Amino acid sequence: MKARSAILYTVLRLLAFLVPFGILMLFPVFRELYWLAAIFAALIGLSLSLLFLRRPLEEATSGLAERRERTRRRDAVRDEEAEDAAADAVDSSEREQR
């Protein structure tokens, strides 16, 4: 995974929440009801990220998928090596018993 794409996506998501929250806090009614401003800012941020952050999300998730696949392949090779070693140990112990 490229750290740059994950960091970029995270920063953009935070901005998609913090900018609307800051703007909403400029209104007097939202100063008293800050939790309502947070809810509206979260909904606005979610909408903005769905509309405009599709490409950074795809880059971040494809990097995660590639990393997971590399780990799976490496684990599969280790499992095969362990199975081969166990089978060789069983074969050698059977030969010694004869």
Image (cartoon, grey):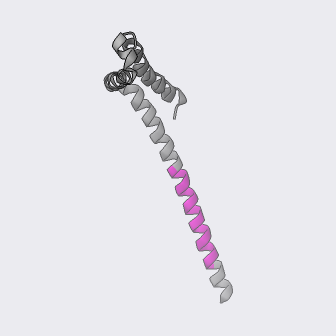
Q: Inspect this view and state whether residue 44 appears.
A: yes
Name the image quarter holding residue 54.
top left
Looking at the image, which is closer to me, 63 or 40?
40
Q: The C terminus appears in which quarter of the rendering?
A: bottom right
Question: Whole-percent x and y of residue 92?
Answer: 65, 78
Residue 62 image position (x, y, % from top left): 43, 36
Residue at 42% across / 24% down in the picture?
Answer: 13
| Residue 20 appears in view | no
Residue nearest the observer in this picture, 53 or 33: 33
Q: Main secondary structure of the magenta part?
A: helix
Q: At 56% from the left edge and 67% from the top edge, which residue is drawn? A: 83
The magenta stretch spans residue 90: yes
Residue 53 inside the magenta-drawn segment:
no
In the rendered structure, the answer to whether residue 47 lies left or right of residue 83 reads left
Residue found at the very far right of the displayed protein = 96
* Left or right of residue 22: residue 72: right
* 71 shown above or below 38: below
- Residue closest to the far front: 32
Q: Position of residue 55 (x, y in %)?
A: 38, 26
How many dots with numbers? Answer: 0
Residue 20 vs residue 86, the one in the foreground: 20
User: Which residue lies at the image location 58% right of the left edge and 67% below the top edge?
Assistant: 84
Which quadrant of the view contains residue 41?
top left
Q: Position of residue 26 (x, y in %)?
A: 39, 9
The residue at 47%/39% (across/down) is: 64
> Which region is colored magenta?
72-91
